[in-house]
Image (tube, coloured by chain):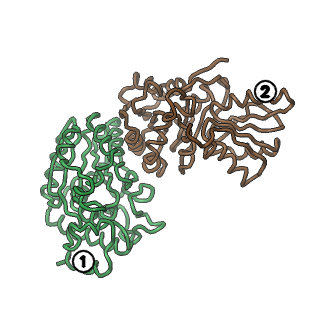
């Protein structure tokens, strides 16, 4: 299966946007080779700021740039963007809804070899809880590119999580991404699997396995986790009567929790959350 | 604004101090000591040095101001009100729900506030970002940021200090309100931050020092700071916590409490005397 890098897609989209819009500025904290902001840095160095290994300062600097009308994209690994600098993101950015785009790579457990210290399994929860913050987890490189274009034109703080590893290609160029809208990637009437990021691909595999035993699963790519697509969740639970969520994140606070919140208040159906147990391994 | 009549500025300082104490007394909580120590610095900036238009708070060529030691918000509010950013009657709402004057500076609610501040240590990074944006846009404005002395115990301050020097941010001037007290006691006892001038110099800054209550000196160093190119400047202002009211001066107790009715009456008398 053809795979592509979400990080590369981000770096290229950023450069294209930067060439068109003088207000786009990019910040990184010594990981521009990994996050791929280096592509922007190479061609538009006067609008690229490397803050060194200093994520808190990076978020504050981004806030100041945004307060002055710039559109800052700040990148580092997910664990540092959302953990190390959480209070800066809260106070300096989200609190007044500043137009900062935090695009973090190396989300989830697939960072792998770097070990538990670098496996970001709480980032979706940490960003989802912040008022004003939009949270997006793209499922392939094409969606990533569309997401970057969409958020560049959206005014307000956004967190985008990508991954170290390459993901299979899910969409073609005709795909239309809209902030706050999930997309049905497989139809079925027996159960709905709502997945995000890498797990969309596993959900599709699982659906094929289920089909072999006569169970047809609807699969949703819920790339925007906040604001979540309530209509699609409720419609799907009405059609299929049961929900399974799947995410590369703890089962606490992320996609599964977001879906539970909608269902518990609006249309309770049986639900099971697939994700990492809330333990450090 | 360019009126260097020192006697006028001194009278203004008394009025601002009275406003601060009345606001804090009415609010029944807030930071008395650190608001009184920063009065002359704020007046020198807003009434002499800074180019700004209270009736057009967002005009492009304005000089920018960030109160990183956000707990001194009452002093800033009193100054902004005196400048004409908002009606004086708003001062009565300090710290009240729904008021435009929240406990710490909040750019959502208060005209003249550029960015939110008050969670200590974050203002210098934001001031750097503002300075870089001005530079990118070729706007010749200056950015002023006031830091507390206890505040520089925050690690982010030193991250931002490196950034300002690394990017040669010379449209930025930091002013450190060195009143030597923090909420738990003398700064030197809680967590020593000295030697301040050597530390900032080592981080690549041009360091100036002043008596933070002497308008002539403050204005001189602010003028000098403007001439420094290729590096950021910090003015270390020696100040007295609680300045202007004898029984608040150098008293750690008044870092974080408001004057009682009795204290207010006494303080106002002293300021008028």
**Secondary element at tag 2:** helix
Q: Which mark is residue B268?
A: 1
Quadrant for the C terminus of chain B, please.
bottom left
Is B120 on the left or on the right of A238, as rendered?
A: left
Quadrant for the N terminus of chain B, please.
bottom left
- Residue A61 visible to the viewer: yes
Distance from Cα at disc 2 to Cα at disc 1: 80 Å
Number of numbered discs on residues: 2
Identify by letter the chain in green: B
Judging from the image, mark 2 belongs to the subunit labelled A
Q: Residue furthest right?
A: A214
Residue at left 74%, top 34%?
A219
Residue at left 39%, top 54%?
B119
Is A244 on the left or on the right of B190, as rendered?
A: right
Please state the horizontal and vertical placement of residue A171, each as a whole percent of the image: 67, 25
Judging from the image, mark 1 belongs to the subunit labelled B
- Residue A103 visible to the viewer: no
Q: Is residue B119 above or below residue B204?
A: below
Identify by letter the chain in brown: A
The answer to which quarter of the image holds residue B134 is top left
Q: Which mark is residue A208?
A: 2
């Amino acid at each position: 299966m053809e795979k592509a890098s979400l990080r590369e897609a981000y770096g290229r989209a950023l450069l294209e946007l930067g060439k068109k819009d003088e207000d786009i500025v990019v910040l990184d904290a010594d990981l521009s080779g990994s996050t791929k902001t280096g592509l922007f840095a190479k061609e538009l160095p006067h609008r690229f700021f490397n803050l060194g290994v200093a994520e808190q300062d990076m978020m504050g600097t981004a806030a100041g740039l945004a307060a002055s009308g710039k559109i800052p994209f700040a990148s580092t690994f997910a664990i540092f963007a959302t953990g190390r600098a959480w209070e800066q993101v809260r106070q300096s950015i989200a609190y007044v809804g500043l137009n900062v785009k935090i695009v973090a790579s190396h989300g989830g457990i697939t960072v792998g070899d770097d070990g538990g210290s670098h496996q970001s399994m709480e980032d979706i929860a940490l960003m989802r809880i912040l008022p004003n913050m939009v949270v997006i987890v793209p499922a392939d490189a094409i969606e990533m590119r569309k997401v970057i274009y969409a958020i560049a034109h959206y005014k307000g703080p956004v967190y985008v999580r990508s991954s170290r590893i390459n993901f299979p290609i899910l969409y073609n160029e005709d795909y239309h991404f809209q902030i706050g809208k999930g997309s049905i990637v497989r139809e079925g009437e027996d159960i709905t699997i709502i997945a995000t990021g890498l797990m969309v691909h596993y959900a599709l595999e699982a659906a094929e396995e289920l089909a072999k035993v006569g169970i047809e699963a609807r699969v949703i790519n819920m790339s925007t986790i906040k604001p979540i697509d309530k209509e699609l969740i409720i419609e799907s639970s009405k059609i299929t009567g049961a929900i399974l969520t799947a995410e590369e994140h703890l089962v606490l606070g992320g996609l599964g929790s977001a879906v539970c919140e909608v269902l518990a208040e609006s249309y309770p159906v049986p639900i099971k959350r697939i994700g990492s147990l809330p333990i450090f391994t | 604004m360019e009126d260097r009549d020192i006697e006028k500025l001194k009278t203004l300082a008394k009025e601002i101090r009275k406003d601060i104490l009345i606001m804090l007394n009415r609010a029944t909580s807030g930071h008395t000591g650190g608001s009184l120590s920063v009065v002359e610095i704020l007046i020198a900036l807003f009434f002499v040095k800074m180019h700004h238009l209270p009736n057009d708070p967002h005009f492009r060529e304005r000089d920018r101001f960030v109160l990183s030691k956000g707990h001194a918000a009452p002093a800033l509010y009193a100054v902004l009100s005196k400048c004409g950013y908002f009606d004086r009657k708003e001062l009565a709402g300090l710290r009240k729900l729904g008021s435009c004057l929240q406990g710490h500076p909040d750019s959502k609610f208060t005209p003249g506030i550029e960015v939110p501040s008050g969670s200590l240590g974050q203002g210098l990074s934001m001031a750097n970002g503002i300075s870089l944006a001005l530079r990118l846009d070729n706007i010749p404005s200056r950015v002023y940021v006031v830091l507390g002395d206890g505040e520089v115990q925050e690690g982010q301050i030193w991250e931002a200090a490196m950034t300002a020097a690394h990017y040669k941010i010379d449209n930025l001037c930091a002013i450190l309100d060195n009143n030597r007290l923090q909420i738990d006691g003398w700064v030197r006892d809680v967590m020593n931050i000295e030697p301040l001038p050597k530390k900032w110099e080592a981080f690549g800054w041009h360091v100036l020092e002043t008596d933070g209550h002497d308008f002539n000196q403050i204005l001189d160093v602010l003028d000098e700071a403007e001439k420094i190119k290729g590096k950021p400047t910090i003015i270390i202002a020696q100040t007295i916590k609680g300045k202007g009211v004898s029984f608040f001066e150098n008293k750690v107790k008044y870092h974080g409490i408001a004057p009682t009715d009795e204290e207010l009456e006494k303080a106002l008398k002293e300021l008028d005397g």
